[in-house]
């Protein structure tokens, strides 16, 4: 079984993936952030580094999917390859940070890769408003993320909502995390687990 968690920067994907992975004994595939050689440069100069960053993420995600599809164990994945193209690259293109030529090149690469990708059995979308995202980003204190602009997060949220509204690749579970603290409050995490259990059981019914 392949479960993936989708959502904007700071919504809690990584933390939830680690918690669910531990409790369900799933393999955990995290987003390549700490070892990404382009992230800091990207937030300092988006126009210069957008294409490089997106190609790096796309390749990293494709390698993850190859691992997931060849594994005999269930896996939970932090962010999907679809988000790379339909959310982040699309947003950068519409915002003028990726040229039309580079965006066309990127989409051609994505479309070649996606032929070999099976969608997740269950997609969990963590819905979060800007104050929640900013609060979580500030809590984890990554230096380069201090450069993230509010407008950038707002645009990403708009893309996410549009994408989720039309998502039809498999089962979808939407969890509004604005008023949840699944790290500190056991009842909040139990609520998420209950909803995940319901969806997982439905996969085998």
Image (spheres, grey):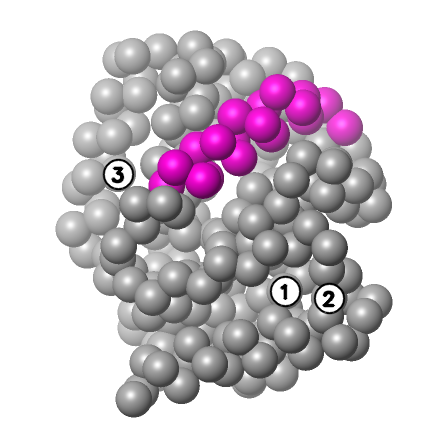
Is 112 displayed left or right of 46 in the figure? left
- Label 2: how many Cα within 10 Å (few below 14, some 14–19, many 20+): some
What predominant SS class does the magenta segment belong to? helix
- Label 3: how many Cα within 10 Å (few below 14, some 14–19, many 20+): some
- Label 1: how many Cα within 10 Å (few below 14, some 14–19, many 20+): some
Who's the residue at 45% across and 63% down the image? 173
As displayed, is residue 87 above or below residue 77?
A: above
Is disc 1 in contact with disc 3, using a CB cutoff of under 8 Å?
no
The residue labelled by disc 3 is 110
Measure how far apart labels 3 and 2 are at the Cα level: 34 Å
Decide if residue 66 is in sight here: no
Q: Please identify, in this view, whether the residue under mark 1 or under mark 2 is nearer the observer.
A: 2
Q: Position of residue 10 (x, y in %)?
A: 67, 44
Who's the residue at 72% across and 23% down the image? 147
As displayed, is residue 145 above or below residue 35?
A: above
Q: Residue 50 or 5: which is nearer the viewer?
A: 5
Is disc 1 in contact with disc 2, using a CB cutoff of under 8 Å?
yes
Where the C terminus falls, by quadrant? bottom left
The mark tally for this picture is 3
Whichever of callouts 1 and 2 sits on the residue coming sooner in the sequence is 1
Measure how far apart labels 1 and 3 are at the Cα level: 27 Å
Disc number placed over residue 182 in the picture, else none = 2
Is label 3 in a helix, a strand or a loop? helix
As displayed, is residue 162 above or below residue 117?
A: above
The residue labelled by disc 1 is 16
Q: Please identify, in this view, whether the residue under mark 3 or under mark 2 is nearer the observer.
A: 2
Is 191 displayed left or right of 137 in the figure? left
Is disc 3 in contact with disc 2, using a CB cutoff of under 8 Å?
no
Stretch of the chain drawn in magenta: 146-163
């Amino acid at each position: 079984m392949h479960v993936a968690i989708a959502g904007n920067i700071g919504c809690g994907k990584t933390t939830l993936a680690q918690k669910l992975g531990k409790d369900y004994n799933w393999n955990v595939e995290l987003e390549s952030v700490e070892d990404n050689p382009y992230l800091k440069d990207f937030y300092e100069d988006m126009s210069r580094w957008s294409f490089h960053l997106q190609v790096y993420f796309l390749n990293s995600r494709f390698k993850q999917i190859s691992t997931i599809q060849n594994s005999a164990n269930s896996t939970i994945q932090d962010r999907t390859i679809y988000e790379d193209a339909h959310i982040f690259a699309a947003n950068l293109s519409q915002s003028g940070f990726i040229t039309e030529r580079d965006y066309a090149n990127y989409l051609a690469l994505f479309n070649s890769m996606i032929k070999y990708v099976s969608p997740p059995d269950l997609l969990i979308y963590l819905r979060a408003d800007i104050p929640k995202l900013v609060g979580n980003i500030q809590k984890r204190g990554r230096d380069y993320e201090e450069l993230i602009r509010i407008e950038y997060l707002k645009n990403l949220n708009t893309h996410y909502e549009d994408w989720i509204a039309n998502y039809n690749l498999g089962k979808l579970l939407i969890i509004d995390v604005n008023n949840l603290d699944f790290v500190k409050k056991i009842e909040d995490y139990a609520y998420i687990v209950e909803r995940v259990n319901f969806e997982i059981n439905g996969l085998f019914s």
